[in-house]
Amino acid sequence: MDLITLSVIILFIPLLGFVLTLFTGMNFKWAFLIENVLIVLGFILSVVLLYNKLSGYLDTDIVSEFNWINLGIIPFFGEIIIKLGIKLDNVAVIMNFTVFLISMVVHLFSIDYMKGDKRYSRYFAYLGLFTFSMTGIVVTNNVLMMYIFWELVGLSSYLLIGFWFEKKSASDAGKKAFIVNRIGDLGMFAGILILFVTYKTFSFQEIFNAVAAGQLPFNSEFWLTITGLLLFCGAIGKSAQFPLHVWLPDAMEGPTPVSALIHAATMVAAGVYFIVRIFPILSGDALLIIAIIGAISAFIPATIALTQNDIKRVLAYSTVSQLGYMIMALGIGAYVFAFFHLITHAFFKACLFLGSGSVIHSMHHEQDIQKMGGLRKKMPITYATFLLATLALSGIPLTSGFLSKDGILAGTLAYTSLTGNWFFTFIGFTVAMLTAFYMFRLVILTFHGEPKNKEKYDHAHESPFFMIMPLVLLSGLSIFIWYTPNPFNADSGWVLSKWVKAPTLSVPESARYPFMVEEQKQESIVKQEEEVTFSHEYTHAMHSAHVPTIFLSGFVAGLGILFAFLFYQWKKLDPNKLAAKVKPLYNLSYNKWYFDEFYNSVFVGGTLAFSNFLRWIDNTIIDGIVNGSATLTRGVSKVSGKFDNGVVDGLVNFTAYFSGFIGLLFRKFQTGKVQTYIVLVIFSLLILLFLFKSF
Amino acid sequence: MTLYDIIFYLFALVTISSAYLVVTVRNIVYSAFSLLFTLFGIAGLYALLGADFVAIVQLIVYVGGILILMIFGVMLTNKITNVQIKTGVFQILPATIGVGIFGGFLLAVLLNTNWLNLNVKDSPATTFQLGQLLMNEWVLPFELLGIVLLIALLGAASIARK
Amino acid sequence: MVTVSLYHYLFVSTILFSLGIFGIVTRKNAVMVLMGIELILNAANINFVAFARYGNFGFQGQLMALFVIVLAAAEAAIALAIVLNIYKVFSSVNVDEIDRLKE
């Protein structure tokens, strides 16, 4: 079986599970097992796909497509053939593997977590639909299919976030996620249309080739930048980047395993993955804006996460922050590390969410960390896995998070050394410190110290096997050894040195970052056998930035952890006093920078005001015109009605009466009596005789 | 004014006056009786015209056959018990006008036409002559007439029995 | 001198014919209508015989009169059968009530 067929089968397995589970779930109690078995099967097949692709076709992309719609030649436009297809490169198969792994553990975790829910099998069906949509995004080779599955992801996130729709907050959160995403998708759609109008194709590779051949939207590099940014709008929505990040914390209203799925593998990863896909056509200006948005999205949620008390909200803001990291890394050219961080983050963030789900489950749906504490003794396995994942997220050496985060920070340093811009470096290290701080705050408040709620603490217990097993699996994947043999430098590992490589840029050289322009070979600077990313200059900068990053990032992470312990474990410092001292800042953070309030007053309120204004226009002007025209019409109709009744009807009636009169007259002759007819015959005969008489 | 003329006028008067009664009298039985006199008168006219055989046939067939048939019809189709053997008349006025004009027109034609008026001598033996004609040149119509009569009898019987 | 000529016979037949038509048109009873028809037939017969007497047709005129008498007999038989049927259906032989033709 060739890999395309295999990937198509993998793609449709979750859909099959969705359909079967949805339609059998009503009558069949064990319907959820279908979905679980199918998703495990899908995982096994995706492992097979990963293995075959990486062992057999390491450096070749497998592409297959077919004509879906052939509209023929359209006047003023040209030939339109819409194709669907599959593209399997290393990025796709690794992502596919990740999606199925996370999806599988989420499925298994949910078996116990959701037990007793009244829509149990429907929940699994939705999970299958979610997995299907994300897989479609991963394996597609064209931007149209990407968009279709993109919207499917939006739909399934809506279904799952609002899964407990009896709760108003949950249904609101579902709507919010859907609508906020739609705002971003609007930009993405516009970008796709620009691409299609310009290149008459949706295929990534054909678009890249056309851009590389010098064909640009509207023949200007500026419009290429605009197109890239419009496409990025979609990623802003899906990956919850700065202006549109507000939906993600609210999405915590969904079941916790769903949060794990959204945050780790499916939804928010889609945005980053999309940028990874279209990276070759992003111009330097577009990348700069992307990096700035990523930096803002990394920083603001990190500050918000410092003061939140809901265990899932802290994790949600950390997800936004980490996604901002990835976007920023893409924006400054650290392509491979961004993707690497996407993968490693998927594992440990899924572990963190499932761990929090385990905690919430055992605490009987208590989510406030101020009411927890001391759970270390009650839930040792959950604690261990949670701690491991936290270490990875904080970027402590020997974890996978260290490798990827370190790479990104090294990227920022290299960017600084190449351009002299310190902004991203500063943000990167600050956020790293903040991340370490709030994550350890979370761990300490949850698992260490004395239990604050004695009653709930006494009832707390370690979770069942199906909830523990995924935690162990995922925390195991947070260790460096799966990615590289060297715990301090991932460059020599198989993921970065062999599997993932930065793509060749298609953007015209004049529109790139200066350091991405391939200069003349400078073989004296870099050793020949090493891979070159973008340019020798950039590769060199990355190398030289690497060692300082290790120490610096280790230092800031340690600093963050130290402060966390000082504040919350050893109580040397009082967080409340600090909060009182910097009251405005604390309030800003605690109230999430007032984003929701701002959006509520400006956009929702503005929309309402505008709607009221429009309603006024509607009521007074439009309705006035309508009523006026109605009155006018009525007047005209009255006149024409009179005319109708008097003249036209008169004529018609006259005709009718006349006909009736004639009929009455002639009716006399039509008696049905033969003798009458004979009389008539006689008379007519007489007339004829008089006419033809010869005398 | 010869005896011939007197006899003609007598027969003509009988014929026309009884015919007038036929079409005007309300009582059907009277009407049928008047028809008897009409037919008698016509038979007399035939005799005056030298057609003795036709006159005899007229008496036998009409008076002896058809008229009896008519009276049978009258009897069968009127409820004797009610003694409602009268018949109504209608559209007298248009009929009178129409028939009057029509009859006048026919008379005008009659008087304005220059008829061949040979006044041939009568043959004493019309029966023999007619028999020869029937059996020679008119034999086919004669046979056909027989068939028509047969079919008519069968048809009448079958219709009346239904 | 005999004054009676062809004209006189034709005059009588014309009167008979007109009376026959008058009878057909005015009488309500179907049998009376049949009588009118008989009058018309007889008027025609008088013509035949008169033309045979005053014309040079030989005896063929009388022959034709014989044929007419025979056909009249047949006609009367069938017509009376029809009248009987009408009576069965409508319980009346009044022609003015039998106006199905109108519909």
Image: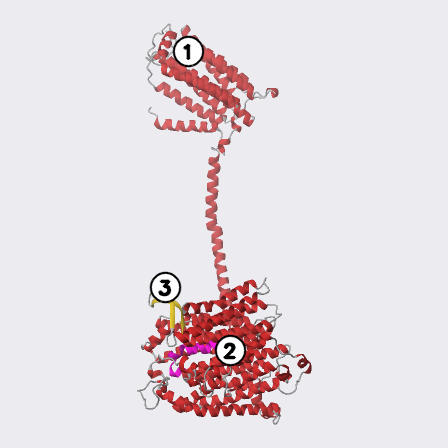
Query: Does the image show residue B5?
Result: yes
| Residue at 53 percent of width and 22 percent of height | B161
Quarter-of-image position of residue A83: bottom left
Query: Is the N terminus of chain B in the top left, top right, bottom left or bottom right quadrant?
Result: top left
Residue under pointer 1: B54
Secondary structure beneath label 1: helix
* Image vertical order of residue B110 relative to residue A72, above or below: above
Chain holding disc 1: B
Magenta-span inclusion, residue A271: yes
> In the rendered view, does A680 fall on the left or right side of A691?
right
Magenta-span inclusion, residue A548: no
**Mark 2: amino acid:** Ala
Q: Residues within 10 Å of mark 1 (few under 14, many from 20)?
A: many
| Residue at 33 percent of width and 83 percent of height | A509
Q: Both on one chain, marks 1 and 2?
A: no
Secondary structure beneath label 3: strand
- Give the Cα separation between the discs numbered 2 and 3: 39 Å
- Give the Cα separation between the discs numbered 3 and 1: 100 Å
| Residue at 50 percent of width and 79 percent of height | A346
| Region of the chain picked out in magenta, as a range | A269-286
Of the image marks 2 and 3, the number of the one nearer the N terminus = 3
Near-viewer residue (C33 or A435): A435
Residue A388 in picture, x, y percent from top left: 55, 84
Residue under pointer 3: A71
